[in-house]
Image (cartoon, rainbow, N blue to C red):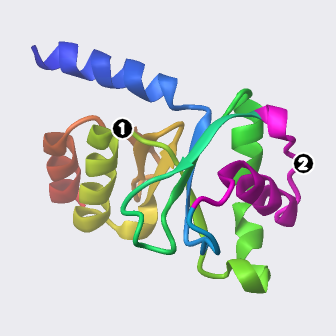
Amino acid sequence: MEDLQYKCNDLEQYGRRCAVRIYGIKQKEKNENTRAIVINFAQKIGVNVAEQDIYASHCLGNRKNSTRPITARFLRYETCQSLLHNCSKLRSIQDYKNVYINEDQTRFNYDLFMYAREVLHQHHVRTKNGYPFYHSEDGYFHKLTSFQQIDKLAQQE
């Protein structure tokens, strides 16, 4: 049964590989065009995104919050990866100092990622294509697939 849950998680994560979540952009209006926000954001960090490159975009969370996260799904994987690779430029742009971008993850992968950051060395835990990885002291990258695996790695450190 557990194997089936992992396979379902893999399929769901694969469906999210062209999507990102952008946190920290303040919205000026209630029903602001999220596509325009994403395009403007991408241009600021040096990625050319046209409106037809975005499959869908919308805000997440409570409408009362002025900094609701934006999720954007792109037609091409390369567009999504370009945004993620250029996100380091955010710190040098005054308007985007408190903005960050993450891969869109399944709930299970997100929970694994957050647990690994708590238990293992925070700066050694990363994500790639939505999956959490741990870079151990011996130089190996471990794909994190269960909470038990994380506990085992923590005991070895």
Q: Residue at x 58, y 67 (%)?
A: 100
Work out which residue is located at the far bottom of the displayed protein and give it. Answer: 94
Residue flagged by tag 1: what amino acid is it? Thr
Q: Residue at x 21, y 38 (%)?
A: 146
Mark seen at residue 152: none
Q: Disc 1 on helix, strand or loop?
A: loop
Confirm whether the magenta stretch covers residue 37.
yes
Mark seen at residue 106: 1
Q: Residues within 10 Å of mark 1 (few under 14, many from 20)?
A: some
x and y, in percent, of residue 46 in the image: 88, 59
x and y, in percent, of residue 47 in the image: 86, 52
Cα–Cα span, label 1 and label 2: 27 Å
Q: Is residue 57 above or below residue 101?
A: above
Identify the image quadrant of the N terminus: top left
Residue flagged by tag 2: what amino acid is it? Asn
* Residue 98 horizontal side relative to residue 67, left or right: right
* Residue 68 horizontal side relative to residue 132, left or right: right
In the image, which residues are magenta? 31-53
In this rendered view, identify the residue nearer to me: 47 or 24. 24
In this rendered view, identify the residue nearer to me: 28 or 17. 28
Identify the image quadrant of the C terminus: bottom left
Q: Earlier in the sequence, mark 1 or mark 2?
A: 2
Q: Which residue is mark 2?
A: 48
x and y, in percent, of residue 121 in the image: 34, 67
Q: Residue at x 45, y 45 (%)?
A: 140
Q: Residue at x 45, y 68 (%)?
A: 123
Q: Is residue 79 above or below residue 90?
A: above
Magenta span main SS: helix
x and y, in percent, of residue 103 in the image: 53, 47
